[in-house]
Amino acid sequence: MASPDPLVIWEAPFGDFFNGAQTIVDQYIAAGESKWRRMNGMVLYLPHGYEGQGPEHSSARLERFLQSCAEFNMTVANLTTPANLFHILRRQLARPFRKPLVLMTPKSLLRHPEVVSDFSEFETENRFREIIDDAEVNTAAKVKKVKRVLQCSGKVYYDLLARKRAEKRDDIAIVRFEQLYPFPSKQVDALKEKYKGKETFWVQEEPSNMGAWQYVNAFFLDHDFKLIARKSSASPATGYKKMHDQQQKDIVDRAFDV
């Protein structure tokens, strides 16, 4: 806060490590500008993704950050491409003002073979993309074939993509919400129009009482919007790898059960 110009990044070994810093997040990250008119551009890297590492190492409590979002006080994102990470960090410094940036950073995406970006995507004519539509649904004829739209954020996208490719499903469109707050309303309105009349689901790895579901659902009250997730739970994740694998498979199975 004392030096807003540099890019300052705090990275947690696991996302839940921020629990010990909850008071600092509440006081300075979420509400510092509202209370004291002090801007800061702090970036938080919080590993977040259900990878079978148990309840203490799966969740960065995305829902807590989204509950603290108001008055454009910070940016919350869950990214899926290297290029989008580059552009959001570039935007963080290029802006003529400062806002905290909270990034969910799944550890498995560091080594995932699909998580790559072409060099051209880093060039100056490109920019940060708040929403990434399904690149394969790019004509009116292909849109017409779509029966179900899966909207998601973060790592679960690659689980859904693998199933879509394996089953060669052209009746499924997968849309990624890269930025969750501020909510990209204009892009979402365009998607609603594009996929008008299609069955629409929010798919998340987190239990239904956690993650982005309750936040995102508030923007779809005028829409038939359903959830696919783990059942509500007091704990962020199971401590048993076998149960984790079954839960993860169940989420993907339900997403493609048209």
Image (tube, rainbow, N blue to C red):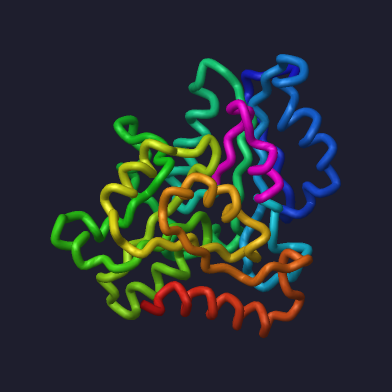
Q: Quadrant of residue 28?
A: top right
Q: Residue at x 64, y 36 (%)?
A: 69
How far across and how far down the image is residue 254, in percent? 47, 77
Please give the range of residues in magenta. 63-77
Q: Is residue 5 visible?
A: yes
Rendered-image quadrant of the C terminus: bottom left
Residue closer to the observer: 100 or 190: 190
Q: Position of residue 42 (x, y in %)?
A: 67, 30
Name of the residue lying farthest toward the front: 222
- Residue 152 in the magenta stretch? The answer is no
On screen, residue 106 above or below 186? below
Where residue 57 appears, x then y in whole percent?
74, 62
Q: Quadrant of the N terminus?
A: top right
Residue drawn 44% across the image and 43% down it: 84
Report the residue at 37% width, 36% height from top: 186
Query: What residue do we see at 63% from left, 69% from top?
Result: 51
